[in-house]
Image (tube, helix red, strand yellow):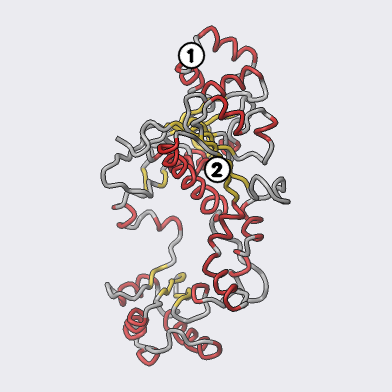
């Protein structure tokens, strides 16, 4: 049995934050039903490159889910959604604040239908405050949270984040935690609640270590001013003959073993050299590393504990024995027509498996609504009215 067997989630979200959240919950066994509109569905379906009609990114985020297409602005479509709410556990949405209320589907409306319902709203700035209706995307939230100010070059040009840290880290992951917490609390109280997840809040929370230093000293972090963003020689990236390597030798024993193995024993006590001396140490290490390829360096370091790893390109990541052993690559087939990233969460007793491929747009409308009590004649009438697809 899966960990979330018996939990039903109605997912109104699109694109990345909400679907990534429900992917995690679906992989843990929740019955996730995507509620898509009848005109275009989840926008992510149509973003190139397409594989078997739908986006590769859509395939990546929507295995183990079903799809129902409803027009929530149509009275009959709204009624159908409320019928699904009556037996659901969770509703996830990512509209701007106020949209669900204008549809007469806000939390207060849903809890009159089902007092046990948990509603999770994922937005950029939250359900209240002066920015509540402000438009934005991942990059904007990272900018507002100060995340962009501590990366990149020292000439004042921030680096573009390599991942959607706001959408996935601050949005999807915090939403999943909130939903699981609300489900647990409901097991005691018998009542649902509204989870308000703001990606700005989540990113600021991730800044806690840097904020702690600022609160204590008044020092404002910037590029290469912190232990973990390149200030010291022992924790930064270096060029090599065919790419780059990461050095994360924070502990003295790791740094000492690294520089000794590389023939630089005189640097053994220079892990945290700062300022001009730190740059001199880094330059000497850089000069040595630049003469070797990544594979030559790996051979020289062998199995020594030195916390030095190659910077891999994406086409190299999935060839690693460790990645394949852990099942983090799913071959085309059961999970969909294109390879996918595997399950990152392992539980010792609970089952994890691909139960179904990503759904076609509205592919499960008739089955899901049929289970909710609509007969064939009623479903035909709904389709004729444009309330469902």
Query: In this figure, what is the number of numbered marks?
Result: 2
Residue occupied by mark 2 = 195
Give the residue at x 36% y 82%. Answer: 252
In the rendered image, the residue lying farthest to the front is: 189
Q: Considering only vertical position in the picture, is 21 above or below 309?
A: above
* Mark 2 vs mark 1, CA separation in Å: 29 Å
Q: Nearer the viewer, residue 214 or 193?
A: 193
Question: Quadrant of residue 195 in the image?
Answer: top right
Q: Position of residue 125 (x, y in %)?
A: 65, 50
Q: Position of residue 185 (x, y in %)?
A: 44, 41
Give the residue at x 67% y 41%. Answer: 96
- The N terminus sits in image quarter: top left
Q: For mark 2, give the secondary structure.
A: strand
Q: Nearer the viewer, residue 246 or 175?
A: 175
Q: Considering only vertical position in the picture, is 305 above or below 166?
A: below
Q: Nearer the viewer, residue 196 or 384?
A: 196
Residue occupied by mark 1 = 373
Question: Quadrant of residue 384 in the image?
Answer: top right
Q: For mark 1, give the secondary structure.
A: loop
Give the residue at x 31% y 77%. Answer: 300
Disc assigned to residue 201: none
Question: Quadrant of residue 163 in the image?
Answer: bottom right
């Amino acid at each position: 049995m899966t960990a979330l067997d018996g939990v039903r989630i109605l997912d109104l979200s699109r694109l990345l934050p909400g679907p990534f959240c429900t992917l995690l919950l679906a992989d843990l066994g929740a019955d996730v039903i995507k509620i898509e509109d009848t005109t275009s569905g989840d926008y992510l379906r149509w973003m190139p490159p397409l594989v078997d009609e739908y986006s590769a990114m859509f395939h990546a985020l929507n295995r183990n889910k079903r799809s129902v297409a409803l027009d929530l602005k149509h009275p009959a479509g709204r009624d159908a959604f409320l019928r699904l709410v009556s037996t659901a556990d969770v509703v996830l949405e990512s509209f701007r604040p106020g949209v669900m209320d204008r549809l007469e589907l806000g939390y207060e409306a849903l809890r009159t239908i089902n007092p046990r319902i948990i509603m999770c709203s994922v937005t950029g700035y939250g359900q209240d405050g002066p920015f509540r209706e402000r438009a934005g995307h991942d990059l904007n939230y990272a900018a507002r949270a100060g995340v962009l100010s501590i990366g990149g070059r020292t000439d004042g040009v921030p680096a573009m984040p390599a991942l959607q840290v706001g959408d996935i880290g601050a949005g999807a992951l915090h939403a999943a935690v909130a939903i699981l917490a609300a489900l647990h609390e409901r097991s005691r109280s018998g009542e649902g609640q509204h989870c308000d997840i703001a990606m700005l809040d989540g990113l600021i929370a991730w800044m806690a270590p840097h904020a702690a230093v600022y609160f204590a000293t008044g020092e404002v972090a910037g590029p290469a001013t912190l232990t973990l963003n390149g200030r010291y020689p022992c924790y930064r990236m270096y060029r090599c003959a065919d790419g780059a390597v990461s050095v994360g030798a924070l502990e003295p024993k790791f740094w000492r073993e690294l520089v000794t193995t590389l023939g630089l024993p005189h640097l053994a006590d220079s892990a945290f050299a700062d300022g001009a001396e730190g740059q001199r140490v880094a330059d000497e290490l850089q000069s040595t590393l630049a003469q070797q390829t990544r594979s030559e360096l790996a051979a020289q370091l062998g199995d020594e504990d030195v916390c030095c790893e190659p910077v891999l390109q994406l086409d190299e990541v999935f060839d690693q024995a460790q990645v394949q052993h852990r099942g983090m690559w799913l071959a085309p087939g059961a999970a969909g027509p294109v390879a996918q990233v595997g399950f990152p969460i392992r539980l010792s007793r609970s089952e994890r498996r691909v139960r179904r491929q990503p759904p076609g747009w509205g592919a499960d409308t008739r089955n899901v609504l049929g289970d909710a009590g609509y007969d064939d004649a009623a479903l035909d009438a709904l389709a004729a009215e444009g309330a469902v697809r």
